[in-house]
Image: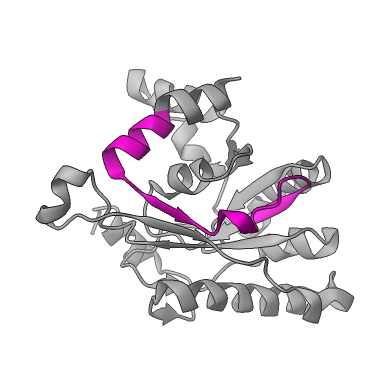
Amino acid sequence: MWYWFFKFLVVGPVLRAGFLPRWTGREHLPRTGPFVLAGNHTSMVEPAFVSYGVPRKVIFVAKRKYYEGRGPKGWALAWFLTAVGQVPIDVGSASSAAPALDTATRLLRAGGVWGVFPEGTRSPDGRMFRGHTGCMRVALPLGVPVIPVAVKDARQVGPWWTWRKGRTRMTVRYLEPFDASPWADRREDPQAWREATDALMARIRDVTGQEYVDRYPTPDELRARDGHA
């Protein structure tokens, strides 16, 4: 209940009226059945914009630290994330992602929609970094569609009255379903997950035009992004 309340009566109207975002390619979104939304990640606002353009419930995962804040603000954020169906995960190591991937698998088997940013964290500088393979680790064995999502101008997004102050309008483009047929006979092969992930990110990058960095962000880059340099 809370998900639909926030999506259509609280968050949605604010996004539309204040930010005037553009959503294109919604004809590529399956009306029924499970599928994965996989997008590039440059801003904290992207989950809201990406999910609002989808007429179904979209479940993302969120870093557990967002559920552990103290004081009224921290408690309110934890309540909000839980109310809209988000799933907390630990991101300290590759193995710690397993609970989130297990949750995603159950969600998809039940016919749901999983939203994921394969880069795993926000880009520290607007470039696209190497994607983690979790998306394909789940999607390939299940054989569910993966819809690439190309988000542009999220780092500079702002309300329409700030557009002349270095802000701009965000565009969310849902692309045609990713063609996973080259890996159909290797669905349990980690190398296939790697190859498919790289191909997925390249598909998104063709639309966003981002510079590509074939590695994960360093801890120093992430600290600088978060203002702890």
Q: Image quarter for residue 141?
A: bottom right
Up-down relation of residue 6 to residue 153 (above or below): above
| Residue in the picture at 43% in, 80% down | 212
Image-based side of 206 in relation to 87, left or right: left
Q: How is the image coloured?
A: one colour
Where does the image place residue 163, in percent across and percent down from the top left? 16, 52
Where does the image place residue 224, in percent across and percent down from the top left? 27, 61
Indicate whether residue 10 is drawn in magenta.
no
Image-based side of 16 in relation to 31, left or right: left
Span highlighted in magenta in the image: 11-36
Query: Which image quadrant: the C terminus?
Result: bottom left
Between residues 112 and 176, which one lies in front from this camera angle? 176
| Residue in the picture at 89% in, 77% down | 185
Image-based side of 136 in relation to 203, left or right: right
Where does the image place residue 30, in percent across and percent down from the top left? 70, 52
Between residues 29 and 217, which one lies in front from this camera angle? 29
Query: Which image quadrant: the N terminus?
Result: top right
Residue 127 in sight in this render: yes
Between residues 134 and 97, which one lies in front from this camera angle? 134
Between residues 11 and 160, which one lies in front from this camera angle? 160
